[in-house]
Image (cartoon, rainbow, N blue to C red):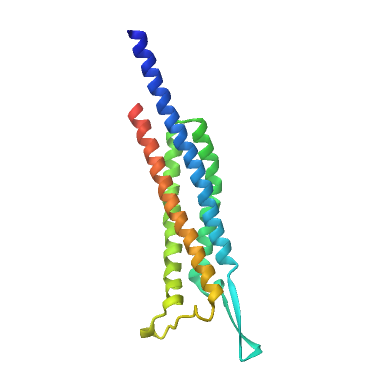
């Protein structure tokens, strides 16, 4: 009877380690997807520009992302977050190999939350500008420009989608790390 109880306890521990390893693999997978989303958003916004002729070919109106400081902040924020996510892949792989690493999980939660704040700030500020580009604000004489700069508006809107997807993915990463930490503290 005692041997059966020991085997059952060992199997329970192995199952918990397997679940933690599975969560660590999911963490790695989500980080890779978040890298793609944030880097793609930075590249899409950073390469956004459109030129329209006005009356003649010699007079042209140009819309570039760098004309608006909010879009520049968006590009920088997404680039910083994607660089951080690339650097954090090493710790994510380390967590697959060592399930009980608590200090590094705490560090990841701390930095993930900081990057979440940066990414949310950049995406939210840019969302306000994109909204004004689409809808305008007649009370302040800001007219919508998306009828003229259609390609510019589509690219900026698309890059916002990728950035907000990155926000959701980083929230999932924080939850995964918190769950893994709580499981570890319950086992001790």
Tell me: residue 26, above or below residue 153.
above
Identify the residue at horizontal 51%, vertical 65% (top origin). 158
Tell me: residue 39, above or below residue 11.
below
Q: Residue furthest bottom?
A: 55
6 left or right of 43 in image = left
Identify the residue at horizontal 42%, vertical 31% (top origin). 19
Residue 159 rendering spot, x and y as whole percentages: 51, 63
Q: Residue furthest right?
A: 58
Residue 59 rendering spot, x and y as whole percentages: 63, 88
Give the quarter of the figure containing the C terminus: top left
Identify the residue at horizontal 41%, vertical 70% (top origin). 128
Residue 68 rendering spot, x and y as whole percentages: 51, 74
Tally of marks:
0
Identify the residue at horizontal 44%, vertical 50% (top origin). 170
Give the quarter of the figure containing the N terminus: top left
Q: In this orientation, which residue lies closer to the viewer: 71 or 29?
A: 29
Tell me: residue 185, above or below residue 3.
below
172 left or right of 81 in image = left
108 left or right of 139 in image = right
Residue 116 rendering spot, x and y as whole percentages: 43, 54
């Amino acid at each position: 009877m005692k041997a059966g109880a020991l085997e059952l306890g060992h199997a329970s521990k192995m199952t918990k380690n397997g679940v933690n390893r599975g969560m660590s693999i999911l963490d790695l997978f989500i980080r890779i997807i978040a890298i793609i989303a944030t880097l793609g958003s930075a590249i899409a916004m950073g390469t956004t520009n459109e030129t329209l002729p006005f009356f003649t070919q010699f007079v042209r109106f140009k819309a570039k992302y760098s004309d608006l400081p909010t879009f520049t902040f968006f590009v920088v924020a997404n680039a910083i977050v994607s660089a951080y996510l690339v650097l954090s892949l090493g710790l994510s792989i380390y967590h697959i190999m060592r399930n009980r690493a608590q200090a590094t999980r705490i560090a990841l939660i701390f930095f993930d939350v900081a990057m979440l704040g940066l990414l949310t700030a950049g995406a939210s500020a840019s969302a306000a500008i994109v909204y004004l580009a689409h809808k305008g604000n007649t009370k302040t004489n800001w007219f919508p420009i998306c009828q003229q700069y259609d390609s510019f508006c589509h690219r900026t809107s698309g890059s916002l989608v990728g950035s907000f997807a990155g926000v959701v993915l980083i929230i999932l990463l924080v939850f995964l790390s918190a769950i893994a930490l709580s499981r570890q503290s319950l086992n001790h």
